[in-house]
């Protein structure tokens, strides 16, 4: 699913993650896609965030904290529009513009989204497609 604008239900789900725990992070090495599962405990369904067509992935955590779930403090998922150069530069995106090697390549014709999470684990992922939804079960 490629989004021009987030639906209000997706915005609410992303905003609700501040009360969640990150249950798992799965990387599809063939497609370089990431699946994130967030749990609120037994009284609510889990939230799944799928990030596809990834351009940048950064995961940071305390090396002594070996297990999930991880407490979430902040979670955002925003389209990259005017601030592409600034965001990609802050994220230390390594690909450079061939016309001006002092700036990052921005893929100006490609829709991009930035998923940011802070808590017991920090994530910064830039992708071209995403989906957000509820799930039940394991």
Image (cartoon, grey):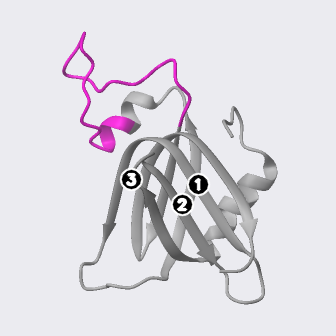
Q: Residues within 10 Å of mark 3 (few under 14, many from 20)?
A: few
Classify the position of the C terminus by image quarter: bottom right
Q: Which residues are magenta?
A: 88-112
Vertical relation: 80 (above or below) 78: above
CA distance separating discs 3 and 1? 14 Å
CA distance separating discs 1 and 2? 5 Å
Asked if the residues shown at circle 1 and circle 2 are in contact, with their CB atoms under 8 angstroms apart, the answer is yes
Residue 59: in magenta span: no
Residue at left offset 32%, top offset 42%: 90
Asked if the residues shown at circle 3 and circle 1 are in contact, with their CB atoms under 8 angstroms apart, the answer is no
Instruction: Left or right? Give the position of 88 relative to 52.
Output: left
Query: Nearest the camera: 13 or 26?
Result: 26
Residue identifier under label 2 = 35
Residue 134, percent across and down? 75, 66
Residue 68, percent across and down? 44, 82
Instruction: Left or right? Give the position of 37 relative to 70.
Output: right
Residue at left offset 28%, top offset 77%: 62
> For the residue labelled by badge 2, is the local secondary structure a helix, a strand or a loop?
strand
Which quadrant of the view contains residue 97? Answer: top left
CA distance separating discs 2 and 3? 12 Å
> For the residue labelled by badge 3, is the local secondary structure a helix, a strand or a loop?
loop
Residue identifier under label 1 = 50
């Amino acid at each position: 699913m490629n989004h021009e604008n987030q639906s209000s239900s997706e915005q609410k789900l992303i905003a609700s993650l501040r009360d969640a725990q990150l249950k798992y992070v799965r990387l599809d090495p063939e497609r370089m896609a990431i699946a994130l599962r967030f749990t609120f405990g037994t009284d609510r369904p889990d939230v799944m965030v799928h990030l596809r067509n990834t351009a940048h992935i950064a995961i940071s955590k305390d090396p002594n904290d070996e297990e999930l779930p991880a407490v979430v403090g902040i979670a955002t998922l925003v389209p990259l529009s005017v601030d592409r150069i600034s965001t990609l530069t802050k994220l230390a995106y390594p690909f450079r513009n061939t016309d001006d090697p002092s700036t990052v390549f921005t893929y100006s014709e490609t829709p991009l989204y930035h998923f940011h999470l802070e808590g017991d684990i920090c994530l910064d992922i830039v992708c071209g497609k995403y989906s957000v939804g509820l799930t039940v079960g394991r």
